[in-house]
Amino acid sequence: ALDQLNQVIVLYSWFLPALVEKFQVLMAMGDWEQAVETADRVRSQDQHNIEALRITVLFLLSQESRYSLAANRISDLIEALNRHEPLNAELYYKVARPFARLAGRHHGVLQLTLSLMDRACKLSPPTCTYAAEYGYQQMLLNDLSGATATLKRASTLEQGSQDVLQHQIKCQILSGQLDEAEQQLEFISEIQASLDRTPEMALCGALLSQRQGRADAQAVALLDEALELHMRTVRKLPYNDEYFVKLNPDLLLEIAREYLRRCGAEPEVLDASSPGALLLNKATKLLEIVTKQVPGLLDGQMLLAHARFIGCDFEAALRCCTFCTKADPTFAAASLLQAQIMLRQERFQQAHSVLEQALSHNFAVRESPLFHLVKAKVLQTQSELQEAAKILEAAMKLPGVATQPDSRAADAAARRSGMPELSLHDRCSIHLQLVEVLLALDRVNDASSVMQQAIFQFEGGPQEGRVTIANAQVELKKNDVEKALTMLRGVAPDNPHYHTARKVLADLYLTYRNDKRMYAMCHEELVKANPTVNSYMMLGEAYMKISEPQKAISSFERALRNNPGDSALASRIGKVLVTTHEYVKAIEYYSTAVQKDPSKSMLRHELSELYLELKKYDQAQKELGQLLANEAAAERDLDEANQQVKSLVLLARVHKEQDALPDAIAALMRAKTLENNILARVRIESPDQLSAQREVAADICCHIASYHEFQKDADRALGFYQEALKNFDTHEKSMLALARLHLNRGEMEAAQMQCVTLMKLDPGNQDASMMLADLMMQKSEWEAAIYHFQQLLEKTPGHFRALVKLLQLLRRAGRLKEATRFLKQAERSSPRAALEPGFRFCQGLLHRYMNDPRAALKALNMARRDAEWGESSITNMIEIYLNPENETNWDDLVLDRAQEPGEAVRAAEKLLRELPRSPRQQVLECYTLMCYKTKSHIEKAVSTLLELLNVEREYLPALVCLSQAYLMLKQAPKARNHLKRVAKMNFIAEMADDFERGWLMLSDVYIVSGKYDLAEELCRRCLASNKSCAKAWEFLGVVKEKEMSYKDAASHYENAWRFENEASAAVGYKLSFNYLKAKKYVDAIDVCHKVLTQYPDYPKIRKDVLEKARQALRP
């Protein structure tokens, strides 16, 4: 048909009927864009063309939500009708009907459609159909008295008209004339044989049932009937203007509202088989149909958003709200719901911005009680309680909040203002929110007063349960726990808020009475009252909370029997078994579940994860192989494709654990390819998933990059980190890793740029903050870095990672005495802080820096079993055991003298076995071998270190350790060559201690060979990175002593003595000896006394210094 019309239009472009027919065909095909374009072409030639104006109005109302522009076009259409068809009553009628049903009860549009119907009625006064339509449109305008009069007149025109009867009944129900409406319905049911059952009649029955307070089941059955009858009439209709009349979106929205009325007002994850979930599902499906056929109907979009909100599908609800606000920025209801959702998602700033934006578009929002409620919630989450209280108190003074308003007047006011009508639930929420805020402000008397008002207003109604729960909180604030418990126990099982009350009651028993039996009993009563899958799940979680896993598993299994196809339930049972360390049972459970139903890929994936955790790599690979075998399904189904990606990522982890990094990278590359295909599909099939899939792609690239980094392939790692950020530009893990990589490569500016970007995205990101401080450390900006960490610790004193960095920085800045204050601050941050492994580690580190090895070992030992701090604690303990006095243990060493290793070396060997295998562990192993001080042990250490350096050529700790081994073997030239390599390396703050050790070793070699200037330069370099380095000060003293500059030597030894915390006998001896040489006899005697107090069996200092100094002082 379209081809034929196009040919006619090409040949006779002036022939408008062909163009009119064309846009009607295009509309029937659903191609609105071309249809409107063709209509505009017609109007450009004939601005009063009735059909072109009709389709334009239909498009504006049904697709675009542009009601004001549609009203202008209807005015043009009325003018065209008056010009071309002034006596055609039927045409006026036909034009008005679809517009009225698509108007979304917009006052301006309905006034114009009413004027069309008025014209039709005047042209043909005896036609009952026109009068009935006129009355119906008056009802849409909420003019019930006018509608009643019109319908009464219509009933005289045609006895027994079905349209008139059903509109009259509905008008009576809405006016509160329930008895008259019931009599009319009974009359119709008696003459049902002569009248067909209509959706309108069934809906009237449902509305009447609801208003008379009858059982919901009856009303729901009538709603179901109304929906079925209605959809049956429109199912096979052609898509034209008459289709919208038959579809009657306004009627469908009424049915949806009635369904939603019975679903509650607050989001709740409902059991799929529960009545509430079934009703919500019906409402959602109905609204999806309406919004698909009439996407421009904002009321439909808004109701769908509300349904999604109640069903906890917040992202979908936000999409509907965004559609509404984009179409009409003044649509306050959408903005208010959007803000409420963002509050639940803890996006407080965004919620506040949405409210401010809504206010800027529509000042009437300020007078809405709902605006006050949401604004107060935003302020409450921002801890601005005084402001929140003021706003809620102002809301209480608004009409219809403190007292029940007249329903008809409230509805009329809502329509005039464009604000959503204040529901009973929202009225109650304002009262209860105010109570909550007043309690938070410790205004208990005021809260009690508001609570009494709430009890008076909502007693005996559907909100009574909520009020009782809130009243219990007031009593708790008064420390009357028993009264609160009594109130909650009084909520009856038939109360709609019974479940919430029982959950609160259970929590009170556990929190205030520590009564686990009653806590479990409350949940058991919930199951008895409503034995649904969700109830059994809650009972299982309750048992888990009180550490009764067997009963929890039993509850989860009962839930699974009620819903055997639920993979999430089966997964929860498996996870509970893993939590209780019943790994054999967990493996058996998962294996049986996947054998029964091989399609449950999620369970097979979890089984593979369990095998990986248990280090059963072959079994993990076997299960993953079966998951990855179904490639054909992955091509068809997005969920299967996502599962394949997860399986490949897990396979990569399995390979990594087996040290097969090339295989791990290959698996991740496969995952990356598959994820790129998913991204391409998601862009078309499911755009709402695009952001989540981009993040998955970024995760994969980040993993690949980390594996390349592990292989020392920095360039490839850099490329994949950058690709990760191209996929998802706010991927924090990649930003941090990229900053760390730049830092290790000495690219300070690039590293800083990544950190600053991350801090802009997340100002509270502590990892980025730590990284910025590392950058400052790398640049040797100690003071700036110290200030940075001090600010961080002022906010979070218990941030032990930051405290460790601060201790290192204070040591390097020579300000270690200030460290005690921060340790005390951390200890006071919480009652259990002193028992935290992180605190013990910090304590041990400080003792080590203060040259108190015994106290350091004691504190570190208390942190050594911790998962987070254990490895660092053990490493420090081993280093202390191997060199407690921080001596140069290669001087004056006599090899091959048979001697047993001391207890310290044995303790170090024992601790080494607790460390996981790593390059650092191998280096520590070599230091332990060298402590045996025999040639064979040292040569074995050299062999191990050379093997390690073949794999990692520039591994600094291994180079330093190898140099020490060569010095111990009296092979100084070899040691010097390796240490020169160390001296030329770029400084990395993380390995500062290893650099320090290497520089000091080379300095010692230079001192021995008489190259004092080179030795002094290396010591200065050490002190530039660590002002507290006692050994560097000591070596500077040695250089000056050899140059016979005793005053300078004494000055350097003073610093060494201070930074050794006056606890090193060797340094004390050198200092006192140089004081003696510099003729500072009193100072020399003072140091001698300090050394002899700590080391009474150190006779050398007494003979060489003390006695000579005393002799020199005698006259």
Image (cartoon, rainbow, N blue to C red):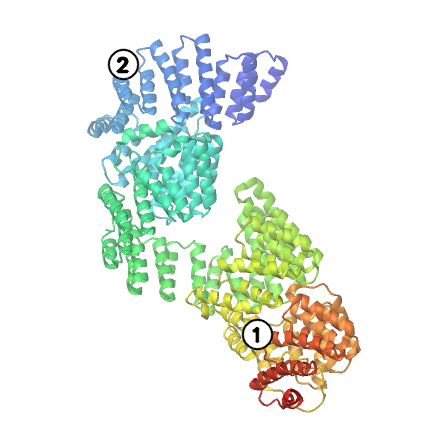
Q: Which mark is residue 850?
A: 1
Would you place residue 240 above or below residue 713 in this image?
above
Task: Tell me residue 422's x, y (percent).
Answer: 32, 36
Secondary element type, mark 2: helix
Amino acid type, mark 1: Met
Residue at the extreme front:
1115
Residue at image mark 2:
157
Task: Tell me residue 358's x, y (percent).
Answer: 44, 34
Q: Residue at x 58, y 61 (%)?
A: 786
Amino acid type, mark 2: Leu
Q: Residue at x 41, y 38 (%)?
A: 336
847 and 520: which is toward the camera: 847
Mark 2 to mark 1 CA distance (whole Å): 105 Å
For marks 2 and 1 on the same chain, the one whose residue lies earlier in the sequence: 2
Q: Are marks 2 and 1 in contact (CB under 8 Å)?
A: no
272 and 1095: which is toward the camera: 1095
Q: Which mark is residue 878?
A: none
- Horizontal side of residue 566 vs 264, given as left or right: right
Secondary element type, mark 1: loop
Q: Residue at x 61, y 47 (%)?
A: 727
873 and 856: which is toward the camera: 856
Task: Tell me residue 461's x, y (percent).
Answer: 24, 42
Within-10-Å neighbours for mark 1: few <14, some 14–19, many 20+: many
Residue 960 picture quarter = bottom right
